[in-house]
Image (spheres, helix red, strand yellow):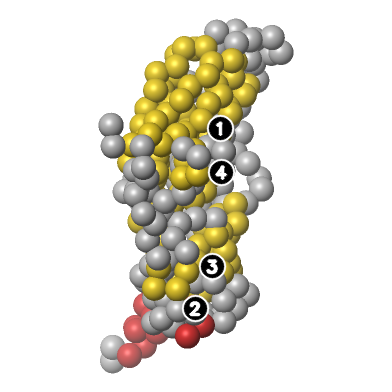
């Protein structure tokens, strides 16, 4: 007598499961604020440096999967001539009342050589993030935000890809592959485009800012965080140096 009632319930469960597996739409943004006019726009420019002798790099051991090889260079320390690479630098405070248009171009993060490439990246809230697998082995993507919904999915074959987005700002969000525990990436997720990942010269530059008072922060996975208060007027460029090190 109960069997005829189970079929509709099973159908509803399947529909709900399918709906839950789809990526929800990102939250809407209001109308973008006007861009500061020429001669009014301000710029913050600077560099991230390390004072003293940086710690030794860690060599990653990958012998657990033949498709990954045996070792890989470290990515957690990158200091050359006192300049820090792979630091995420961003305007932490001062843009709360400014609304920016969400980018339509996705950010791509590849799993290649059993590493996440890039290792550190910046995205905006709701912006599409495309994860790729370029390796002939199983990977998975496990995001671990504290302010947004986490996702955890597999990319089982070479060429597999999947797009996600993160709804709420957070710097930083860890991404890991549960299959290969050394594989980690870090995402700075913001409501605005004023962020950068430093290269070998440690430099960053944020143009087209409204004049005002700001807090700029640099994050590095091994060195921690450094902040600087910056005041910049109309048409001015403020220079700032963020220093990591034992002192």
Crowd class of label 2 (few under 14; some 14 to 19; many from 20; radius 10 Å): some
Label 2 – label 1 distance at C-alpha: 33 Å
Residue 240 in the figure: left or right of residue 108: left
Crowd class of label 3 (few under 14; some 14 to 19; many from 20; radius 10 Å): many
Disc tally is 4
Across and down, in percent, residue 72 comes to 47, 69
Label 4 – label 1 distance at C-alpha: 11 Å
The quadrant of the picture occupied by the N terminus is bottom left
103 or 112: which is nearer to us? 112
Against 90, is 95 above or below?
Answer: above
Label 4 – label 3 distance at C-alpha: 22 Å
Q: Which mark is residue 111?
A: 3
Going from N to C along the chain, the mark reached first, 4 or 3, is 3
Across and down, in percent, residue 58 comes to 37, 61
Q: Residue at x 51, y 30 (%)?
A: 47
Q: Which mark is residue 204?
A: 1
Q: Secondary structure at mark 1?
A: strand
Circles 2 and 4, Cβ within 8 Å, touching? The answer is: no
The quadrant of the picture occupied by the C terminus is top left
Q: Secondary structure at mark 4?
A: loop
Q: Which mark is residue 68?
A: 2
Q: Nearer the viewer, mark 3 or mark 2?
A: 2
Q: Nearer the viewer, mark 4 or mark 1?
A: 4
Task: Identify residue for label 4.
Answer: 200
Q: Secondary structure at mark 3?
A: strand
Against 93, is 201 above or below?
Answer: below
């Amino acid at each position: 007598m109960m069997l005829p009632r189970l079929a509709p319930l099973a159908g509803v469960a399947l529909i709900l499961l399918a709906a839950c597996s789809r990526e929800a739409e990102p939250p809407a943004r209001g109308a973008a604020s006007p861009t500061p006019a020429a001669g009014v726009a301000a710029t913050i420019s600077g560099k991230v440096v390390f004072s003293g002798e940086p710690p030794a790099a860690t060599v990653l051991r990958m012998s657990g999967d033949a498709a990954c090889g045996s070792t890989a260079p470290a990515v957690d320390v990158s200091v050359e001539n006192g300049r820090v690479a792979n630091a995420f630098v961003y305007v932490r405070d001062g843009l709360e009342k400014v609304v920016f248009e969400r980018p339509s171009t996705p950010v791509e993060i590849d799993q290649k050589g059993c590493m996440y490439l890039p290792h550190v990246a910046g995205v905006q809230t709701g912006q599409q993030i495309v994860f790729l697998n370029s390796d002939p082995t199983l990977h998975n993507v496990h995001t671990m935000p504290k302010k947004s919904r986490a996702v955890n999915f597999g990319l089982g074959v070479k060429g597999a890809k999947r797009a996600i987005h993160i709804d709420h700002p957070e710097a930083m969000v860890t991404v890991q592959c549960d299959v290969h525990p050394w594989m980690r990436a870090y995402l700075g997720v913001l409501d605005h485009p004023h962020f950068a990942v430093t290269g070998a010269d440690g430099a960053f530059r944020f143009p087209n800012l409204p004049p005002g008072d700001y807090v700029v922060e640099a994050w590095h996975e091994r060195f921690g965080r450094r902040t600087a208060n910056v005041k910049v007027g109309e048409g001015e460029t403020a220079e700032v140096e963020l220093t990591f090190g034992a002192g």
